Structure formats: structure tokens, C-alpha cells
Amino acid sequence: MKKIHHVVVMTILYLLNLNAGTNAMQISAFSLKEMLLVIPPIFILLGILDTWVPKEVMMKYMGEKSGWKGIVLAFLIGSAAAGPLYGAFPVAAVLMKKGVKFSNILIFIGAWSTTKIPMLLFEMSALGTTFAITRLLIDIPGILIIAYLLEAMISNEYRTELYKKAEYL
């Protein structure tokens, strides 16, 4: 039903305003192409992570008792990631399945969205090293604060429910 709705809206837009309709179709085609290029490699990597890395290893390095090791690893994995933010969520689900501490998952998502290495390099060349490093130094504590606040605000029952749901993905 939703597919038909989108087609109808696009057709009406195209008939009412040729330029806007053409632009909407081009944007949709670009988004589809981007998703088709990004999603398959992410799922291949997820399969490898899920199959080759034992749960015990992930819990040791990123679990409840991982401490700074888990935080640093979450930042490194998130910062080294490629692709748009929607690619982080399936990875986060696999991390949950592997028993990674909730705050480390939130740090991973925050790093994926904010501290990517390619973005930092681009900012250094386009906006200057001072700007890029300043932004990074502000973002890192911000990500940590948000992750720990969210972890504290979410009840243990709800967190347990999320982890149970991740087991079936």
C-alpha cells in the first residue's frame, strides 16, 4: 500500500510541477543507488562479525567489564566506519547480540555519526586543522556524556528487552 502511495504522490508532483517531480525522482534514484551500494557490504561484514567473532571475545573487549578498553574500541570502530548513519544500526544490533555494553553501543553510534576519520580529514583540508580538531575535542566528551546519560535513563527492564530482541535478528 505504501509503495502505491509513494508512486501516486510522485506522479501527482510530476504532473503539477515538472521540475519538482523530476528533482524528486532524481533524488529517489540517487538514494536507491546509494543504499544498493552501501547495504550489501555492511551485511557481509555483519555476517563475518556474527560468525567469526565469538560472543565471549566481544564481551571481554566491549562488554560490561571492559572499561576504557571498550570505550576506545567503540570509538575506533565507529570512527573507522564508512557509509551513512543508517548502516550503523544493523551493526549495533549485532553488537547487542554479542553482549556489548549498552553505553559502548551508543558510543559506537555516536562515533559513526560524528567522528568519522574521512570526515575529519576533509574538514582539516577544507576548514582548517584548528576547526577540525576543536570540533573533535568537543564531540568526544559530548558523545560520552550522551551515551552515559541515555544508559542511566533507560531502565534495566527495557534494556534487557532490547538485548532479547537483538538475539532474534
Image (spheres, grey):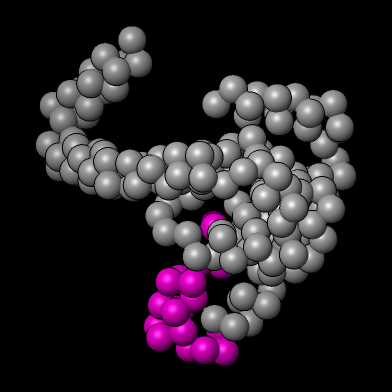
Residue 75 spot, x, y in % from top left: 63, 64
Horizontal relation, residue 99 to residue 87: left or right: right
Residue 31 seen by the camera: no
Residue 52 spot, x, y in % from top left: 51, 45
Whether the magenta-drawn stretch holds residue 15 is answered as no
* Span shown in magenta: 112-131
The residue lying at 57 percent from left, 47 percent from top is: 53
Q: Residue furthest top?
A: 1
Residue 55 seen by the camera: yes
The residue lying at 66 percent from left, 41 percent from top is: 55
Number of marks: 0
The residue lying at 41 percent from left, 77 percent from top is: 122
When the figure is inspected, residue 73 is found, relative to residue 169, above or below; the finding is below
Q: Quadrant of the C terminus?
A: top right
The residue lying at 53 percent from left, 40 percent from top is: 50
Whether the magenta-drawn stretch holds residue 129 is answered as yes
Q: Quadrant of the N terminus?
A: top left
When the figure is inspected, residue 45 is found, relative to residue 162, above or below; the finding is below
Horizontal relation, residue 131 to residue 157: left or right: left
Residue 40 spot, x, y in % from top left: 33, 41
Horizontal relation, residue 38 to residue 13: left or right: right
Residue 62 spot, x, y in % from top left: 72, 53
Q: Characterize the magenta stretch by its predominant secondary structure.
A: helix
Horizontal relation, residue 18 to residue 154: left or right: left
When the figure is inspected, residue 141 is found, relative to residue 146, above or below; the finding is below
When the figure is inspected, residue 40 is found, relative to residue 127, above or below; the finding is above
Given residues 159 and 131, the one toward you in this image is 159
